[in-house]
Image: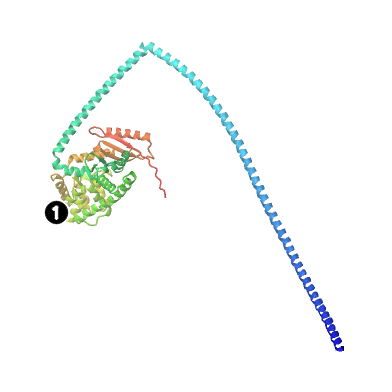
Amino acid sequence: MDNTIIYILLALIGIAVGAGLVIVINTIKGNAVNAKSKQILESTKKEADKIKRDSILETKEELHRLKMDTEKELKEKKLEMKESENRLAQRESNMDKRDLMFQKREEALDEREAKITAKQAAINEEQVKIEEIKNEQIKVLQDLSGVSREEARDLVMEKVKESMDLEITNYIKERENETKLECDKKAREMLVLSMQRYASDIAEEQTVTVVNLPNDEMKGRIIGREGRNIRTIEAITGVDLIIDDTPEAVVLSSFDPLRREIARITLENLIKDGRIHPTRIEELYDKVSKEMNDKIIEYGNNALFRLGITKVDPKLVAIIGKLQFRTSYGQNALTHSIEVAELSGILAGELGENVMMAKRAGLLHDIGKAIDHEIEGSHVEIGVDLAKKYHEPEEVINAIASHHGDTAPTSVISTIVAICDALSASRPGARNDSLENYLKRLEQLEKVTDGIEGIDKTFAVQAGRELRVVVKPEEVDDLESYKIAREVKDKIEKEMQYPGTIKVTVIREVRAQEEAR
């Protein structure tokens, strides 16, 4: 019993002690939790204060930035408004000035109109007075002459009739002369036709060139729209194109073989190229002209190589090559010179003279004919000057000067060259005197425009029946071209003698050209 009570007491004591311990532990834990909570609250409060301060700073900065932007925008708006106000003020000032100017101009126009009206009235009054004076003068003249106006008109008509009768008589006389010339021309044509089997190959080689066409449609392309292609070819080459019923052929007619050859090559290149228009024609013509210069040098070198002549100035070689395109009485000048050189070499060899010197003198004896259409003077004088210029030997210079008897020969070689020149010229069929005169007349016709200002080129075409004069458009206007045509016509009538009539055509062309890149 006592043990049980003890056990119970112990149990109660244990429970009391445990409860006390629990209370103590809980109290300790509660204090710790409260301390931690207080610490958390303090840290949270500090963080909230920091966030609050940062937010206030950011808000203040944003407000300051917005304030600055607003002030800048206000300044810009004020500046724009000020500029607009200045422009409006300037425009208003300009409008005021313009209104004042228009007002003054209107006043000036009114004043001018009033003056014109007054002058018109004065003119009308003067016309009335003039008409009255005119009638009085006519009446006085009728009284003095005793002839009325109708009778005076009849007298004038009689004078006009007499003048017309004289002009009709002159016209009939001119037609009779033209008919005679036509008869002579027909007679000459009949003679030429009768001799055709003997001279046709030579004459055609010297006056015309035939260019073969792939088809007859090419003729239309050569002519071009409204004839612009054929006009361009004739204008830049100075050669007359004859397009007739001959199938697949075009004839080039010119007294100058060099022009005819350049025109032939240009036309053949155009046909091969297929692009036939004025610009392409001019391009090919320039190209062929440059190539022809090389070909001329080739002719000269071939002649020197054939004769075995060396040490000749290159510029003189080019002049020798030009002889290929010159004729003397219908005879090719280069062929004639080579022939004289070969004959001179043979005779010099037989006589024991210097063969190469004789050939050299024979080749150069007619060198002046290569440029006698460019320089004033006879071909002998020009040849002597050229030989001296290019330092040819004295024997060659004397041979050139004496081969026509103008100067006495000073060496056997000069005499040999003169003899061989006569031999080459006198062989049957070598020369044609009428053709040479014909060519000289055409050259004289082209030179008739020398001394007239504003002329660029001159071409004699249609066998000398037409003279085409190309003027410089920047120096000559349209009205001046008529004056030049009449001046050339008067000069031809004054200085030349010719059968029939010669048509003078003045060509003035202006071109504006730009290149798009």
The answer to which image quadrant residue 256 occupies is top left
For badge 1, the amino acid type reads Ile
Q: How is the image coloured?
A: rainbow
Farthest right residue? 2
Between 3 and 218, the residue placed more toward the observer is 3
Between 80 and 414, the residue placed more toward the observer is 80
The answer to which image quadrant residue 136 occupies is top left
Q: Quadrant of the N terminus?
A: bottom right
Give the vertical position of 327 relative to 304 (above or below). above
The answer to which image quadrant residue 187 occupies is top left
Residue shown at 17% from the left, 35% from the top: 188
Farthest front residue? 1
Q: Secondary structure at mark 1?
A: helix
- Residue identified by numbered label 1: 346
Between 143 and 21, the residue placed more toward the observer is 21
In the rendering, at what x and y percent does residue 118 appear? Answer: 53, 22
Residue shown at 69% from the left, 56% from the top: 65
Give the vertical position of 105 relative to 218 (above or below). above
In the rendering, at what x and y percent does residue 79 appear? Answer: 65, 48
In the rendering, at what x and y percent does residue 429 appear? Answer: 14, 44
Q: Is residue 204 visible?
A: yes
In the rendering, at what x and y percent does residue 231 appear? Answer: 30, 40
Few, some or many residues within 10 Å of mark 1 (<14, 14–19, 20+): some
Between 279 and 68, the residue placed more toward the observer is 68
